[in-house]
Amino acid sequence: MSQWYQHNHSLFREERKRLAEACELMMLSVVAPGFPINSAVLTNTECAIAHGTYSIQAKDGRGEIEYGITLWTPPNYPKLPPVLFGNDPKLPTENIDRHIPFNGQACLAVNSEIELHWPPGSNLVDFIEKLVAPFLAWQAYYDAFGYPPSWGGRSHGNKGIFEFYTDILGMSGDKIIVGFMKLLERKKPPKGHEICPCGSGRKLRDCHQNLLNETRRILNPKKVRMDLAIIDGNSGPKITRKKRIPPFRHK
Ligand SMILES: [Zn+2]
């Protein structure tokens, strides 16, 4: 599969320059197959990764904590976002409590949520500032106190997905949320005569059509579909083999 930087040299140059300016200890480079992403996984194709050290201000006043990180970019970047890997003994590679479920791959947010923070047109530095920095601030708190902070960090798996959609829709209940997600994943807006998933029994036009349309404006149907697939357990196989990167799943 061809890689994004092979047919978009100017984007690669821009991304590398921006990254060097914003994070002086990080670098975007093209690496060969077999390059170590961290102690658990290697690349299996040539690809572009941003790697190095990122320092974050610890919230307890202990000054800065530095974390070694690697951002793997998918072949069709920036259509799909980068994937963050911890590359640091402080970030354990198999720890669900740290939101690092396997191979050091960080679970930053649900698919739709990532797109909210990193909309089309965003770059690597945006990704670091909007998604990586809060994740590392959360890790720094954990490292300082030995337990997770009360802020940030959703539950694991499906529960985290339901939490996100509950925040967005202001409604709860798994069945209701899935009902709204099924309308949100559609390419075309649902019709007013369809029944509202909120459980009122009323037609959308007499119920939550405005909320639905507002939400459709900010969420990408494709990403909602990815979140739904995870809930349905159809998100594909997890990485089980060590020492091999991809096939990646954006979770
Ligand atoms: Zn309703």
Image: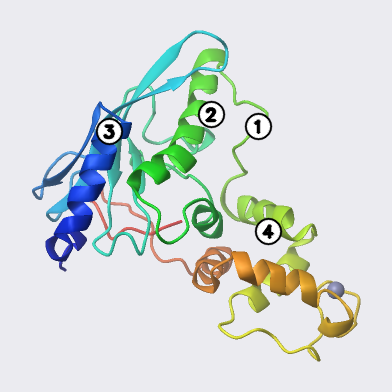
In the image, what residue type sits under mark 4?
A: Tyr
In this rendering, is residue 6 above or below 189?
above
The location of residue 225, given as percent across then percent down, is 53, 71
Q: Residues within 10 Å of mark 2 (few under 14, many from 20)?
A: many
- The quarter of the image that holds ligand 1 is bottom right
Q: Position of residue 53 (x, y in %)?
A: 29, 26
- For image coordinates 71% across by 74% down, the residue present is 213
- Where is residue 187 drawn, in percent x and y? 55, 83
Q: In terms of sequence position, does the residue under pointer 3 or pointer 1 come before the other?
A: 3
Any mark on residue 21, and which?
A: 3
Please tell me how many numbered marks the rendered image carries.
Answer: 4
Labels 1 & 2 near each other (Cβ < 8 A): yes
Secondary structure of residue under mark 4: helix
Q: Residues within 10 Å of mark 4 (few under 14, many from 20)?
A: many
Quick one: label 2 or label 4, which is nearer the N terminus?
A: 2
Q: CA–CA distance between discs 3 and 4? A: 36 Å
| Label 3 to label 1: alpha-carbon separation | 30 Å
Which residue matches tag 4?
Answer: 165
Please state if 105 lies on the left or on the right of 36 as rendered: right
Q: Nearer the viewer, residue 228 or 103?
A: 228
39, above or below 32, in the image: above
Check disc 1 and give the amino acid type: Trp
C-alpha gap between disc 1 and disc 2:
8 Å
Circle 2: element type: helix
Quadrant where the N terminus sits is bottom left
The residue to which callout 2 is attached is 138
Q: Name the front one of labels 3 and 2.
A: 3
- Sequence-wise, the earlier of marks 3 and 4 is 3
